[in-house]
Image: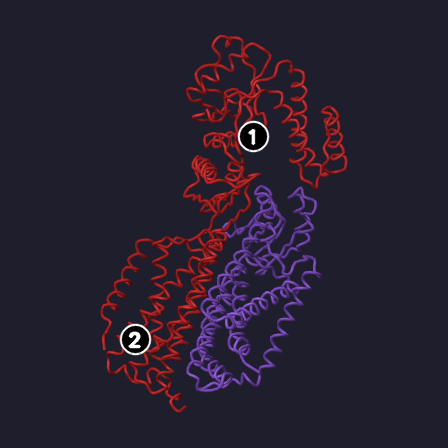
Amino acid sequence: MKYNLELIKNKRKIFGFSTVLILFSLFGILFSTFNTSYKKPINLGMDFVGGNELRIERVCEEECSKFSPDLVLENLKDISKNKNFLKNIKLQFQNNNKLISIRTPYLSIEESNNLITNLDNIIGPLNYKSKDSRLIGPKLGKRLLTNCVTSLLVSLFAISLYITIRFDKKYALFALLALFHDLLIVFGIFSWLGIILSVEVNSLFAVSLLTIAGYSVNDTVVIFDRIRENLKLKKEGHNETIQLSVNESFRRTTFTSITTLIPLLSIILFGSYSLFWFSLALSLGIIVGSYSSILLAPSLLLKD
Amino acid sequence: MKRRQGWLFFIIFLLTLSVYLLINYPLQLGLDLQGGSQLTLQIIKEEGKVTKDELDAVNSVIDRRVNNLGVSESNLQTLGGDQLILELPGEQNPLVASRVLGKTALLEFRTQKKGTSTDLKKLQLQRLNIKELIEQYSSSEKSQYDDNFLTNIQDDLKEIEQELNYSSTSSDLYEKLIEIKKYVDKEITNLFIKTDLSGKDLINAGRRQEQTNSNWEVLLTFSNSGGEKFAEITKSIAGTNQLLAIILDGESISEASVGSQFANTGITGGSATISGNFSAENARELEVQLKGGSLPLPIEIVETNTIGALLGSKNILKSLYAAVIGLIFVGIFMILNYRILGFVSVLSLVLYGFFNLALYSLIPVTLTLPGISGLILSIGMAVDANILIFERIREELYNGNTLTRSIDSGFQRANSSIIDGHITTLLSCFVLFLLGTNFVKGFAATLGIGVLISLFTSLNCSKTILRFFTTYQSLRQKNLYLPRNNFSN
């Protein structure tokens, strides 16, 4: 089976498509920064702003009875002396009212214990073995954020440096363009998810961006390697050689993406909730990354 | 054709070793998988960076306190130069630990300034009043407050403020109460003069129940020089109306007079008791803090994670099942597309899995949820390397090369791409590991280890297994390597 992607013919379409994707992302980021309550390019989660998150299961004989969240909240107002406490509290029932998840501003450990005791009184009994709670002070959150941003910048810099040494400048530049294209789009999609579904990003999201960066560069490097190898043989013209190289690498890039996507999809479908958004971000990144390394990056190398 | 027998035996040896390691050194599961609590303690320093010495000093104090608390199997480690991470496995409540660890526990002995008796009495009275108000306020449920109750507290507070000639600026009633209490504590402490006796002069602390009532008292045992200092100090104020105050973290926890019978020698024997309405729990916490010594710098608990054992095991099982299902599908995909080559890659991935897990138990790497995701992603890298090689072999076969030559040049020509890809990923892992938080580190560690092992398994193990297969004539037909219909192209 030979593949025949008409790269040269469709150059404009590819550029057009990427421009649309980039505008879509930028619009999401701008909208999120100026038009939402959190005034950030992306909806930062508890990891970065601090707070308290509690998930705990109820012990029910058969079906768990329903409670209105407002009623429960009404009974929780004694927990903190902080006045804004009630305003910033989110409570959800999941799994047929069995699982309670509650998010509040930062609480001390004592206050958090009180919260659980109060919950137990209202909607108990609770299964303490199923408790999952996280308290993050606002100071630590800020630190985590700067930490993640620095890690991201430093490793992008290291990758750029490596490619610049490994390839000539033009190739390196285009590989990096493709990389930023991928990261921007995944970031933008999560900005939109934040606006529409209030999806928050945590430190795992930063990790997924870094992993996407690695994958994207890897994919592009493989295709550029092939282009360079074929250009040395000089069988055909410059543009035709590029197109040929892309078609030769097509199977490898799609297969790799598929084999990486399979476990990720499996985690999205069957894995624990804590890895859901992480796996989704990675999957999106791998799809966008394959697109950009097969179609976008080589198209940038084409001569008019 | 060489069988690469040496390599084959080496690989079998490594596999046996891995199995042996895994049986004898089971994998360590992180708290997010086995359940437990994790506290992140931040050292607070106003100016400059926390030095190595300061970090060590804080670490050893916290370590002693944790040990004295009797928490089982706890684990304390430093992180990033100014943080400590304390892990409490199982269902131990982090509440007690947090109360005991967070205090500086700076113990001072001070003598009263001359002629301050009236001032002190006034302040002691106000301290009693404010404590009572705080007690009233926090013991009742907020929903039960009626306006009357609040107005009463506010009125009482105003009276105290007038007596003290100090008023709080805070708008929140509770914060106001706490602020006034702190002010009173500070004023009381200021009526006393520092001595050279402090918590450093203690060699032990204990507790016992008072005989006359159910309250507890804390016993202090001084070192030799501490005992002498204590005798000296008590001698200097014996029989006067000056009091001796024991001050913990700026708050006087006991003020006592020294009887005139000690005027000649002071209180000797090298021990003292603090009796100030301690409950059993309070007394124990103070004991632990004093035994551990005072912290050279204050600390703050910035993060607490508690994960129930039930949820932990659910998490691990769910994600592991998901990963295994995914990997089985990857295996099927590889065999469908690459026939024997696919089978070889499945074998080499199984080896890959064993080597990875064996290294985790050897290093040891504590397996956490992000760690597992790193492992799964690194499997992706390993599969990718195999695909790169197999695609090259296929091409060579299409071009009419012999099987042996195709395999050889396939490995050779895929080399540079594989190494490039692995290095870029390793770079990211390296940065993540250096800069990342504890959480991110787990991911970077397993991904990094995986990438390194993948270099070995895909470049070497796959080749060795493939070479071994191709020594059998029956396994050397081209159609076992390429789906038949592709020959028509």
| Chain (red) | B
- Provide residue A136's location: percent of width, then percent of height: 57, 48
Q: Which mark is residue B103?
A: none
Q: Position of residue A84 (x, y in %)?
A: 69, 47
In-image side of A193 versus B323 (left or right): right
Chain letter for the purple part: A
Q: Nearer the viewer, residue A28 or B207?
A: A28
Asked whether residue B391 appears in the rendered view, the answer is yes
Badge 2: residue crowd in 10 Å (few <14, some 14–19, many ≥20)? some
Identify residue type, mark 2.
Answer: Leu
B313 shown above or below A11: above
Count neighbours of disc 1 (C-alpha within 10 A) and say few if under 14, some if 14 to 19, many if 20 or more: few
- Left/right placement of residue B462 relative to residue B290 reads left
Between residue A243 and residue B30, name the one nearer to us.
A243
Quadrant in which residue B122 is drawn: top right
Label 2 chain ID = B
- Judging from the image, mark 1 belongs to the subunit labelled B
Taking depth in this image into account, of B275 and A198 the one nearest to the observer is A198
**Element at badge 1?**
loop
Tell whether B233 sits left or right of B341. Answer: right
Q: Residue at x 59, y 53 (%)?
A: A48
| Spot occupied by residue A23 in the image (x, y as percentages of width and height) | 65, 71
Number of labels in the image equals: 2
**B249 over A116 or under it: above or below:** above
Q: Which residue is mark 2?
A: B466
**Residue matched to label 1:** B249
Q: Find the distance from the CA under tag 2 to the CA under tag 1.
A: 71 Å
What is the three-letter code of the residue carrying label 1? Asp
Eyeballing the image, is B23 above or below B295? Answer: below
Q: Position of residue A249 (x, y in %)?
A: 45, 79
Residue B314 visible in the displayed image: no
